[in-house]
Image (tube, grey):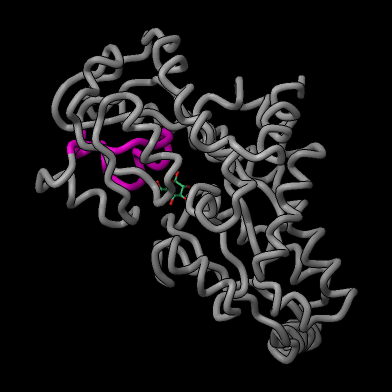
């Protein structure tokens, strides 16, 4: 009996090995192992592997192993990278419509953002990716972003005057910091830590999980929850790669990406709390009772400069109308 069990187990292992992945999708992420976006794409890979009987696999290259976002986006457009989990921010200069999701204070809350990305506006913007050699598969959470710096607590817009902040590589964010009286420096994410440490910049802005996992809180001890941005993130695929697959496989990939969204949202909510606890315990000075009204008012110029076409104006109206 024992013999039979052993050989059966051996058979299962052997057949598992024989069913090596026919298609392995290489996926990029700037975040480290264990970060919600990384785990969610891994979960998507597990679903795909199971649903395709082991034919389609996903290999996640975390921690910017394949490069910084701006470069990996280009590589994905070229079909060198198959999947990419990125913030929408670095797409602003490539796909104009994505700008509306990068406007300061455009979303009233995370719930509002979810309602928008899960609805028609979200679908319309995802569809725009196909005009740029990409396929937009799903939206992930990016929390709300706030300013942190190494110099002093920011308690009002006036405190931003003269401070140098790193922003993601998008003109919208440069203008946002300018409008508040600060100086913006667009830099790749991976350069932020050392740039704060060496004083090249005074600070940056991000959500709790990124502020924590990047270690930026170790060099920037002041964090002000002005929550100027709620930028959704996206999982995109190379259009060339997608179109090289059968219709059935394409559908499997689209569905698995969709099914990874609730996994992501759950992981995100938990990580936000855990990161906040870790940062607070480390002694970072947090300003969490800031009056946001002057920040919101200062953003009019950003809207005037970037929301100029009828198409973007209409998108902004539609976003605001979502309950
Ligand atoms: C994080 C996003 C990541 C961006 C990073 C940044 O998850 O995609 O690369 O911010 O600030 O919150 O560049």
The reply to whether residue 271 is in sight is yes
Q: Is residue 138 left or right of residue 246?
A: left
116 or 208, which is in the foreground?
A: 116
Q: Which residues are magenta?
A: 202-220
Answer with the quarter of the image where residue 13 lies: bottom right
Answer with the quarter of the image where residue 122 lies: top right
Q: Is residue 11 left or right of residue 142?
A: right
Q: Position of residue 219 (x, y in %)?
A: 18, 39
Q: Position of residue 165 (x, y in %)?
A: 26, 38
Identify the residue shown where x is 43% and y is 72%.
Answer: 66
Please say if 11 is above or below 275: below
Q: Is residue 223 magenta?
A: no
Answer with the quarter of the image where residue 108 lies: top right
245 or 263, which is in the foreground?
A: 245
Identify the residue shown where x is 29% and y is 38%.
Answer: 204
Quadrant into which the C terminus falls: top right
Q: Position of residue 37 (x, y in %)?
A: 55, 51
Q: Position of residue 74 (x, y in %)?
A: 51, 70
Quadrant into which the N terminus falls: bottom right
């Amino acid at each position: 009996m024992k013999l039979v069990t052993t050989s059966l187990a051996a058979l299962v292992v052997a057949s598992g090995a024989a069913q090596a992945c026919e298609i392995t999708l290489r996926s990029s992420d700037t975040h480290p192992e264990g970060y919600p976006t990384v785990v969610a794409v891994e979960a998507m890979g597990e679903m795909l592997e199971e649903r395709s009987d082991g034919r389609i696999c996903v290999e996640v290259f975390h921690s910017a192993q394949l490069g910084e976002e701006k470069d990996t986006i280009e590589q994905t457009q070229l079909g060198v990278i198959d999947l990419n989990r990125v913030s929408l921010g670095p797409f602003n200069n490539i796909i104009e419509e994505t700008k509306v999701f990068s406007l300061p204070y455009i979303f009233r809350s995370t719930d509002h953002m979810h309602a928008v990305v899960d609805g028609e506006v979200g679908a319309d913007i995802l569809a725009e990716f196909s005009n740029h050699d990409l396929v937009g598969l799903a939206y992930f959470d990016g929390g709300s972003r706030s300013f942190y710096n190494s110099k002093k607590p920011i308690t009002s817009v006036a405190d931003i005057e003269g401070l140098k902040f790193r922003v993601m590589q998008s003109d919208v964010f440069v203008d946002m910091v300018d409008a508040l009286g600060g100086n913006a420096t667009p830099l790749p994410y991976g350069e932020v830590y050392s740039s704060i440490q060496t004083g090249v910049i005074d600070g940056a802005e991000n959500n709790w999980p990124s502020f924590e996992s990047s270690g930026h809180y170790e060099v920037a001890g002041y964090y002000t929850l002005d929550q100027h941005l709620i930028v959704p993130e996206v999982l995109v695929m190379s259009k060339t790669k997608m179109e090289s697959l059968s219709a059935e496989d394409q559908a499997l990939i689209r569905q698995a990406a969709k099914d990874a969204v609730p996994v992501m949202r759950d992981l995100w909510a938990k990580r936000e709390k855990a990161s906040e606890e870790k940062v607070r315990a480390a002694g970072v000075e947090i300003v969490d009772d800031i009056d946001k009204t002057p920040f919101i008012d200062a953003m009019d110029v950003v809207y005037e400069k970037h929301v100029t076409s009828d198409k973007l104006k209409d998108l902004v109206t539609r976003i605001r109308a979502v309950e």
